[in-house]
Amino acid sequence: NNTGNNSTLSPYVYENIVASVPFRKDLMYTKIHFAEFEEPITLFDYYFNPEYNKPSVGDYIKRYTIGLPGVILGALRGEQEPTDNSNLDIHPEITTLTPDEEKCYKLLGEITGFSLDDKNGYLSLSANMPEPLAAAELAQAMLDNLESYVTRYKIEKVQEDLNFIEERYNEVKAELEDIQSRRAAFMDANYNITTAAARVQQERLNTEYTITSTVYTDLAAQLEQARINVKETTPVLTVIKPVTVPVKKSKPARAKILVIFTFLGGVMGVGAVLAIPFVAEVVGSEKMKGWIKELPAKEKTPAEA
């Protein structure tokens, strides 16, 4: 049928969808279960609502040590006035973010992942959270949202056609019912038609009924075809590996860290042992020479004596 929408959505666009502001904003307000709270809360509340995210002692230490330059710069600049978004009510299609939502948007870019395998023809979604169940729920929310966005794009045109035909169908149906009622009332009131005016009125009602009935029948067929088009156009994302609750932490990789730092420690230790005598000799520092422990002299054998 030429009313069908055969356009395809390239999988390369999926990455842009996942990184878009509306997609992540929907994601940050998806409720997720956390072990420390009885009821599920949104990702935004978990990270930025003081009621749920209370800074720990370590956070304060980090803020006023490593993050001290940022605190000083923020104090010098002063508090940033919130953006006035009241005028954007006339443009509901424009998505806006508060400062905290902007931070959550960037955070989602760090804790979620998307990859496309061109060779094998599949895409992967991932999520990193402090708790395994929360990570699985976030990944499932990404999959559900992606399927919803792709479906919305694919069926947009055929859905508009369906809505238009359905609206016109309901209008013609109401007109047909009205004509049927007027035609029946006229026939009841004029059982034995004797005047020419009555015959003309009857013909008009019959003609109006025939035309409206034909249009109604045609629209009913178009409506059914439009519903079929929507069903046929609706995409289905086939899940090869469903979301599962992880049993192992993805990071930190303790074994890898142990091996790397053991290797670095050995290299630094050997380097220090070899470099200190050379540096002490070049600089002429007696103190550095004192760090070097001389090996005991080898005793001479009688033959060597």
Image: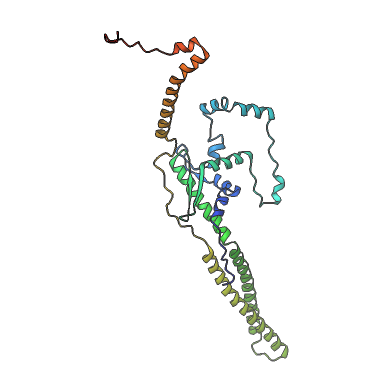
User: What number of labels is visible?
Assistant: 0
Foreground: 140 or 221?
A: 140
Instruction: From this view, report whether residue 60 is shown above or below residue 215.
Output: above
x, y percent for residue 66: 56, 27
- Determine the image quadrant of residue 293: top left
Residue that lies at the very extreme toward the left in this rendered image: 302
Residue 227 in percent (x, y) is at: 55, 68
Q: Vertically, is 193 above or below 302?
A: below
Report the front residue among 55 and 20.
Answer: 20
Name the residue rendered at 58%, 51% in the picture: 16
In which quadrant will I find the N terminus?
bottom right
From the viewer's perspective, is residue 201 above or below residue 172? below
Residue 113 pos. (x, y %): 51, 45
Q: Could you tell whether 27 is left or right of 294 in the image?
A: right
Q: Quadrant of residue 2?
A: bottom right
Please name whichever residue, 97 or 3, is drawn nearer the observer in this view of the structure: 3
Instruction: Indicate the colouring scheme.
Output: rainbow
Residue 219 position, x and y percent, is 60, 74
Which is more toward the observer, 216 or 106? Answer: 106
Q: Residue at x 62, y 27 (%)?
A: 69
On-image quarter of the C terminus: top left
Q: Is residue 296 left or right of residue 197?
A: left
